[in-house]
Image (tube, grey):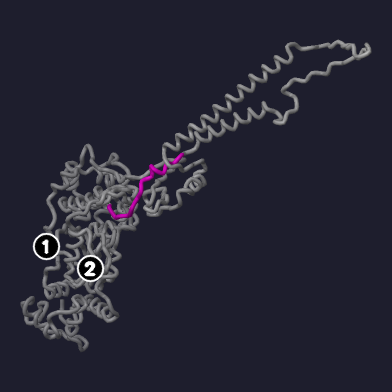
């Protein structure tokens, strides 16, 4: 169980680092046309060819392209409402004026028709005749002809080439009204309001989906944010954060080391900034480190943009793909002393200090942050001249589990982490940047006296690994079937606290491939001369023979 004084000291320190008014800036859409339809977002832009592009979320790389002419019908079909694409606001106003004039003319024509119709009927039939007299007309020869006047029919009901004019005028009004309403209800997308996106670039630090490049041209950011990056800071509960205490326990309840881990996380997540140092975690058990990477780092940064790199993919071809446009590099159990024909530490330094470089004929963008995890003390990727925060991680997770009364099982711990995730993210977003930068801190890994870094002579490293019976470096460095058989042999002998004398050079070459010693006897001589106080390596007084084979006891 945790000592209450330790917990209170840590939480008190954390309270001094949080800001009342956080400066966190959420990842936003940037320079793009954003529409909201049916509670759904749509982002619109043009590419350099003049085609229309659109997407429905900033959390995915996928987007769609169509011609400007087809954009309206495509969006109308998707959203189920009328959408029309026009050139500019001037065209929109012209359409509005045309629809308005058409409606006004229809209404005027209809009124004029009514007035004319009413006036015509009034002139022709001043009064209604109920009875008509017979008219006798005196024709030639004084013959009387009787004429019966015809029945009078109203003008509006007479047959006419245009049939029923009143109905026609009313239909014209209805059509103009419908046209006006349709215009009002149509969503118009103006082409000149769609920014022209000239290219794509990986720019996490810009914190915008559409930003400006070095030339001032609009570009689409290839970095894809997570859901936690696009929301502002919310209220948080510092006293009851599982993840905060998880990191505290992982760092063996060392307040300074815990704050250094949080500093790396803050720079990596809250500012999407490239830290000027690597975070190095090592332990003889990987439980804490795997949970930290899989349950915290990957959800924070998007697992597709985090790359786990091992000894098996350190060649040029693999690295030219794995290192390009990633936000987190996790180098796990790297024991190769040489990477890309240079000391392994040079790769770390290059990734820290260079954002662009060329490898295997490919221009790489390397703006990600470095997390080195190791279950062995041998970490050749760091050295005195490699800025690093190095943390010796607790090998047993039982103390943390006892604190929260759960079983020491990764799935139980995972539930706690998921439950606290939004709260922890708000804590990260609320950290005060000036206080974070004031934290002391990196490049001082020399306090970890048991770390075997890239500056240490390979012979000394080999001597220490054999004495510690550390099988991890050998297993991590396996490249051939012969290596695999030798590693199995080493493991079996370590279980019996011994090492095979006659195969020492073979073991050495698994780790370092080539060395100054050309023979097994020469290697033994150097191990005795430089690192043993006895007549034999590893403080042995003599060689021990078992079943006809010679061993050194450990």
Q: In the rendered view, tell whether residue 550 sits above or below residue 115.
A: below
Q: In which quadrant of the rendered image does the C terminus lie?
A: bottom left
What residue range appears in magenta?
188-203
Q: Is residue 334 magenta?
A: no
Residue extending farthest front: 141
Residue position marked by numbered label 1 in the rendering: 385
Q: Where is residue 505 shown, x and y percent of the image?
A: 17, 82
Exactly how many numbered labels are in the figure?
Answer: 2
Q: Give coordinates of residue 305: x percent, y percent.
A: 31, 57
Residue for badge 2 = 334
- How many neighbours does mark 2 have within 10 angstroms: few (below 14), some (14-19), or many (20 or more)? many
Q: CA distance from mark 2 to mark 1?
A: 18 Å
- In screen coordinates, is 176 left or right of 197? right
Quick check: 269 above or below 359?
A: above
Choose top left, top right, bottom left or bottom right for residue 545.
Answer: bottom left
Q: Residues within 10 Å of mark 1 (few under 14, many from 20)?
A: few
């Amino acid at each position: 169980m945790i000592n209450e004084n330790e917990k209170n000291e840590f939480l008190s320190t954390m309270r001094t680092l949080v800001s009342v008014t956080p400066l966190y800036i959420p990842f936003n859409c940037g320079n793009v046309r954003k529409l909201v339809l049916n509670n759904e977002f749509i982002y619109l832009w043009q590419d350099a060819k003049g085609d229309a592009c659109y997407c429905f979320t900033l959390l995915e790389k996928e987007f769609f392209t169509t011609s400007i002419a087809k954009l309206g019908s495509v969006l109308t079909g998707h959203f189920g409402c009328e959408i029309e694409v026009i050139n500019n606001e001037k065209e929109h106003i012209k359409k509005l004026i045309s629809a308005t004039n058409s409606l006004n003319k229809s209404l005027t024509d209809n009124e004029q028709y009514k007035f004319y119709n009413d006036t015509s009927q009034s002139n022709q039939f001043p009064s209604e005749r109920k009875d008509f007299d017979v008219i006798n007309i005196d024709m030639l020869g004084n013959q009387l002809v009787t004429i019966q006047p015809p029945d009078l029919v109203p003008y509006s009901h007479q047959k006419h080439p245009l049939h029923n004019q009143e109905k026609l005028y009313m239909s014209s009004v209805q059509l103009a009204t419908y046209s006006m309403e349709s215009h009002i209800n149509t969503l118009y997308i103006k082409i000149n309001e769609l920014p022209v996106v000239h290219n794509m670039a990986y720019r996490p630090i810009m914190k915008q989906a559409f930003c400006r490049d070095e030339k001032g041209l609009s570009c689409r950011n290839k970095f894809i944010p997570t859901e936690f990056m696009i929301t502002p800071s919310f209220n948080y509960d510092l006293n009851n954060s599982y993840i905060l205490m998880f990191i505290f326990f992982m760092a063996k309840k060392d307040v300074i080391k815990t704050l250094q881990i949080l500093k790396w996380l803050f720079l990596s997540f809250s500012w999407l900034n490239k830290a000027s140092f690597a975070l190095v975690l090592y332990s003889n058990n990987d439980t804490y480190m795997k949970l930290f990477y899989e349950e915290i780092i990957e959800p924070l940064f998007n697992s597709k943009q985090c790359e786990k790199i091992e000894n098996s993919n350190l060649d040029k071809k693999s690295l030219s793909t794995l290192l390009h446009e990633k936000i987190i590099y996790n180098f796990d159990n790297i024991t190769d002393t040489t990477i890309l024909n240079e000391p392994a530490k040079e790769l770390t330094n290059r990734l820290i200090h260079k954002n662009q470089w060329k490898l295997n004929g490919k221009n790489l963008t390397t703006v990600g942050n470095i997390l080195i995890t190791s279950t062995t003390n041998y970490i050749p990727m760091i050295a005195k001249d490699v800025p690093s925060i190095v943390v010796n991680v607790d090998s047993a997770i039982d103390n943390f589990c006892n604190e929260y009364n759960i079983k020491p099982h990764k799935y139980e711990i995972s539930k706690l982490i998921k439950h606290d995730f939004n709260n922890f993210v708000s804590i990260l977003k609320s950290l005060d940047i000036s206080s974070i930068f004031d934290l002391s801190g990196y490049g001082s890994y020399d306090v970890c006296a048991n770390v075997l870094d890239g500056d240490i002579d390979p012979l000394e490293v080999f001597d220490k690994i054999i004495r510690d019976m550390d099988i991890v470096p050998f297993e991590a460095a396996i490249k051939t079937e012969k290596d695999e058989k030798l590693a199995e042999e080493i493991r079996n002998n370590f279980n019996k606290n011994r090492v095979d004398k006659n195969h020492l050079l073979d073991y050495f070459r698994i780790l370092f491939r080539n060395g100054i010693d050309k023979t097994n006897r020469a290697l033994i001589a150097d191990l005795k001369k430089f690192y043993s106080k006895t007549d034999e390596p590893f403080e042995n007084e003599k060689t021990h023979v078992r079943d006809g084979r010679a061993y050194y006891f450990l």
